[in-house]
Amino acid sequence: MEAMARILMKMMGIMLWLMVLVAMAVGGDVKYKDPKQPVGVRIKDLISRMTLEEKIGQMVQIDRLSASPDIMQTYSIGSVLSGGGSEPLPKASAEDWVNMINEFQNGSLSSRLGIPMIYGIDAVHGHNNVFNATIFPHNIGLGATRDPDLVKRIGSATALEVRATGIPYVFAPCIAVCKDPRWGRCYESYSEDHKLVEAMTEIIPGLQGDIPAKSRKGVPYVGGKYGPSEV
């Protein structure tokens, strides 16, 4: 019996070692996780591995009230948001926000493919969901200033505070051209004059960073990083 037990133990050890070797071999061929591969190659490789359920999950954005690490892992959810007033707890600190987002992200990274989620938040006139953040006048008031440079600096200040809470994505700016004040969200429009609204889009490089003069057109740019994988 002891001899049989020793043989079984050796066989189990060999099987475990073979499983490790197979895992290493498969892992070495996962192109979508290799930052040295071209973006197109990484995307093609990732999509080829995804099930229909995972593709659907990646196109879904849920409110943080519906999210949990387990849900992020199980359903491969692509994005989480905080709508108006949606916060981790009353008077949450920047650390509270970071901890909450990290928990969701850990769930996403524990999924079968380990695709990170993107967290988004309403930060249209400052990081307005966060306690003690700087709140700026809403767009209708900023439009009245006729000052695109001011709006750009507001974008930069907002970006700093948003990133301090671990969030890379804001639902801004609103570039609606409001023609009728009876529309309930007319205050989110800079002006009824489309030329002024166009001028106020200076907030975009404020939020994202200035695009270098020689950068390729049509390639996303955020704070010095190029390509869809960096957005």
Image (cartoon, rainbow, N blue to C red):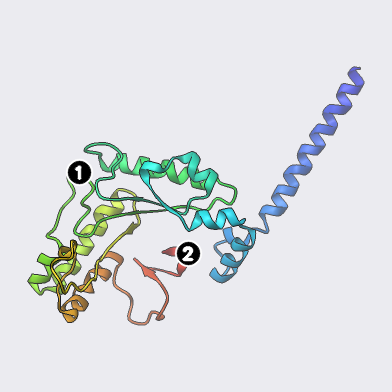
Is 169 located above or below residue 94 in the figure?
A: below
The numbered mark at residue 131 is 1
Q: Position of residue 205 (x, y in %)?
A: 27, 70
Q: Position of residue 125 (x, y in %)?
A: 19, 59
Q: Nearer the viewer, residue 31 or 66?
A: 66
Q: Quadrant of the C terminus?
A: bottom left
- Amino acid found under the numbered disc labelled 2: Ser
Picture residue at 66% right of the left edge, 53% below the top? 27
- Amino acid found under the numbered disc labelled 1: Phe
The kind of secondary structure element at disc 1 is loop
The kind of secondary structure element at disc 2 is helix
Badge nearest the viewer, 1 or 2: 1
Answer left or right for 12 relative to 121: right
Picture residue at 56% right of the left edge, 54% below the top? 54
Badge 1: few (under 14), some or many (20 or more) residues near its Cα, within 10 Å?
Answer: few
- Determine the image quadrant of residue 230: bottom left
Q: CA distance from mark 1 to mark 2?
A: 31 Å
Answer left or right for 162 relative to 46: left
Q: Is residue 110 visible?
A: no
Q: How many marks on residues?
A: 2
Q: Which residue is mark 2?
A: 229
Answer left or right for 43 relative to 99: right
Q: Quadrant of the N terminus?
A: top right
Q: Position of residue 10 (x, y in %)?
A: 84, 31
Is 224 located above or below residue 164 in the figure?
A: below
Badge 2: few (under 14), some or many (20 or more) residues near its Cα, within 10 Å?
Answer: few
Q: Is residue 194 visible?
A: yes
